[in-house]
Image (tube, grey):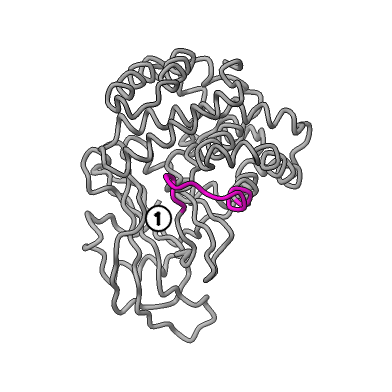
Amino acid sequence: MSGPIQVESAEDIDPHWMTAALRRYGFDCDVTSLSFAPIGTGQMADSFRFRLSVGASSTSAPPPPTSVVVKMQAADPRSREAGGAGAYETEVRFYTELARTLSIRVPECYAATLPDESNRFALVLEDLAPAEQGDQIEGCDVDQAHAAVVNLAGLHGPRWCDPELRHLEWLRSADGEVAGLQPLLADFAEQFIEHYGSRVPKDDAPVLRAFAEASGSWLIGRGERFSAVHADYRLDNLLFATPAGGSPVAAVDWQTVMVGLPGRDLGYFLGNSLLPEDRRKSEHDLVAAYHEALVAEGVTGYSVEQCFDDYRYGQFHGLMITLLASMMLTHTDRGDEMFLAMSSRACEAIRDLDSLDLL
């Protein structure tokens, strides 16, 4: 796959580089100057908003953007190494090979380069401003959750149980997660409890341990239903419209996309993104809205009762992501606060929904 040349940092991106990237998409333009600033809270890669001064030709080509988002390898060595283990390639290939077959709202990809031997990659993406990133710690309201689950159906519905997904060599499968992951999760559960100490609620430790012990069978459970799943569909990876405009919601950060049970995305999002009291009041309606959107995408033979049961089963995805990310990535104050909020909300949802009975 050809694209813009890999660069080591955002400082290395100049007008010539950006001109080549935009022309690759079909913009007939010359970037004359640019400036950038970091955006987002991602821990495995770095993102920057580039503001562009552009001279366009008089052809009928689409008008070039005056602002784009560039996503590239993390400056932090530990996060960069983790991303280079497959996440960077996965995200590039999602945008270039899979996104066009789905109806979920994502940024348009103008140019992309696969990672090199130094784990350098680049994505030049549509800037969805003035939409704003959600806040995983603060949580969202029910209206935002409704928009997010309807958008999620646009990921799952178009390729529901499509066997061709299993032939994409770059797209991981839940079946392939099992080897070595269960003992790793058991170890990470103990590390998590020890690392955060008294900040882990007393009732949560048994839930963390029970999931880690049964995670091997959970990972391969319910394999008869599958689709492309985001696997990290949460507020920090969603952009919401503001009074100034923007799409109702769009999903970003596709480094973890894989083939698996759609209910994992649904359970993870609602269990981690709503405050517990809001989730309890609205979860039946929100699951029903997601199911209605699936049916509109053409999904048949899947009842709303089955959907809610998969939602219960999917709650454990939040614990898996929290344990892996909190123990494998560089610790930050915000990251620690986020992981504790995610763990606490997931454990509470698991207890409320009796999800442990499904393991």
Instruction: Say few, some or many: other residues with alpha carbon within 10 Å of mark 1 (under 14 / 14 to 19 / 20 or more).
Output: many
Residue 252, horizontal then vertical, whole percent = 47, 51
Task: Tell me the residue at 74%/39% (across/down).
Answer: 299
Give left or right: position of 120 versus 295: left
Kindly identify the residue that appears in the image at 30 percent across and 60 percent down: 38
Question: In the depicted view, which residue is nearer to us: 67 or 238?
Answer: 238
Residue 245, visible in the rendered structure: yes
Residue at the farthest bottom position: 58
Viewer-nearest residue: 336 or 212: 336
The image quarter containing residue 111 is bottom left
Q: What's the amino acid at mark 1?
A: Ala
Residue at image position (49%, 14%) is 214
Residue behind mark 1: 112
Residue 80 seen in render: no
Q: Position of residue 134 (x, y in %)?
A: 47, 52
Observer-nearest residue: 96 or 140?
Answer: 140
283 vs 96, nearest the viewer: 283
Q: Position of residue 186 (x, y in %)?
A: 38, 16
50 above or below 158? below
Magenta region, residue range: 134-147
Check residue 16 for magenta coloring. Answer: no
**Which quadrant of the figure contains the C terminus?**
top right
Look at 44% across and 48% down and name the residue there: 138
